[in-house]
Image (tube, rainbow, N blue to C red):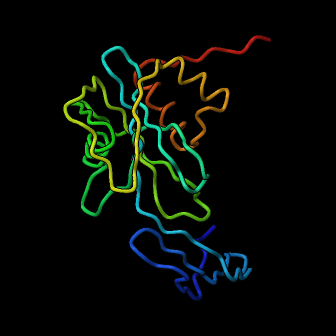
Amino acid sequence: MKSWEILESEYVVKDRWIGLRADTCRTSHGHVLDPYYVLEYSDWVHVVAFDADFRVLLVRLYRHGVGEFTTEIPSGRIDEGETPIETAKRELLEETGHASDRIIHLGGLTPNAATHTNRSHPLVAYDCRKIAEPNPAGEEEIETLWVEAEELLKWIDDGRFYHSLQIAGILMAFRHAGLLSFVRPPA
């Protein structure tokens, strides 16, 4: 196998938030795909923030893409020159007013490897504590709430928490924290 050859590439949209490319590609078998759209985004972080009792810090805010209020974990775009841990600290403080001295990067996930260029970075923050009032970005109106870890899993199961990339990060963070174990389903 070998990578596709890009015969031509043109930006349909390009600004500081998103790039949309229309590529003309030739596969290794000679098939030409025209156009093949590629979305360019910055990388993102998603922070699973635990307090000392392993409750999870959540945020509730309006998301225009789905046109509704959603419950999520603190998250945000990695600015140029920032590491995922630096972004996690910034977003946690801005959105919730909380901080942690122990934030661990759990890896990088791809939102959609077929069409997206970016990565989503789940992080876990232990022993979070409030140190300031939240100071969200101008367009954000955010409420914070704490939920028991087991309750959050119920919210995922019944569809009250449905952000797929964040669910992946939550499962990774719960596993890191020793809150998940493998149990075989009943026969």
Describe residue 174's horizontal placement relative to residue 102 as left or right.
Answer: right
Which residue is at a point 40% across and 42% down the rendered structure image?
142
Pinpoint residue 182: horizontal percent, then vertical percent. Answer: 58, 18
Q: Quadrant of residue 106?
A: top left
Relative height, residue 125 to residue 110 (above, below):
above
Relative height, residue 51 to residue 46 (above, below):
above
| Foreground residue among 79 and 94 | 94
Pinpoint residue 16: horizontal percent, then vertical percent. Answer: 38, 72
Describe residue 111's horizontal placement relative to residue 52 as left or right.
Answer: right
Pinpoint residue 7: horizontal percent, then vertical percent. Answer: 59, 87
Describe residue 180's horizontal placement relative to residue 125 as left or right.
Answer: right
Pinpoint residue 19: horizontal percent, then vertical percent. Answer: 48, 74
Relative height, residue 96 to residue 12 (above, below):
above
Q: Quadrant of residue 163?
A: top right
Which residue is at a point 58% across and 56% down the rendered structure image?
65
Residue furthest right as drawn = 187
| Foreground residue among 165 and 109 | 165
Quadrant of image for the N terminus:
bottom right
